[in-house]
Image: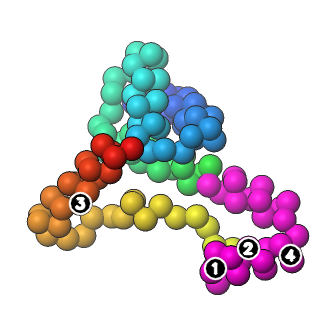
Amino acid sequence: MKITDRECLVNYLIYKALKNNNLKYLIIEAINELKKSKVLLPSIVTIENIIIEVRNYVDNEIFDVISTSVSNEQKKSLDILINVQSTEKKLNYPGFVKYQGSPHQMLSMQLRIELSIFAV
């Protein structure tokens, strides 16, 4: 995948992620866009890394918009509501954790991912 292809895909996915930040949706959209552009499909890990990058960017943009439009008093109220220690905390996706375990744990994680995809 060329850098320009990657940049086009990232820009396309940012637009899509602002509408729907669902992982499965973004993977399907990425694959369809690459096929439509007649680009050789990269590995699924590469697509996942691009989507993680896009989701983090979108989360930061949303966080910045909310942060700038909310008063300090409202931020304190929100902190109390969501039990956050600091207003600087960024949104996280607990599903994206680097693998550090045994093969059994990897199979267990894979099964949970497959089950969550079918549950959506």
Tell me where residue 31 appears, x and y as whole percent.
39, 28
> As displayed, is residue 79 above or below residue 51?
below
Q: Quadrant of residue 108?
A: bottom left
Tell me where residue 12 appears, x and y as whole percent.
57, 31
Residue denoted by label 1: 84
Q: Is residue 33 magenta?
A: no
Q: Which residues are magenta?
A: 59-85
Q: Earlier in the sequence, mark 3 or mark 4?
A: 4
Tell me where residue 33 appears, x and y as whole percent.
47, 23
Q: Earlier in the sequence, mark 2 or mark 4?
A: 4
> As displayed, is residue 12 above or below residue 70?
above
Residue denoted by label 2: 78
**Which residue is depicted at the point 69% across and 52% down?**
61
Q: Quadrant of residue 25?
A: top left
Q: Report crowding for label 2: few under 14, some 14 to 19, many 20 or more residues within 10 A (C-alpha).
A: some
Q: Earlier in the sequence, mark 1 or mark 2?
A: 2
Q: CA distance from mark 2 to mark 3?
A: 33 Å
Residue 83 in the figure: left or right of residue 2: right
> Which one is in front, 110 or 31?
110
- Discs 2, 3 touching: Cβ within 8 Å: no
**Which residue is depicted at the point 77% across and 55% down?**
65
Under mark 2, the amino acid is Leu
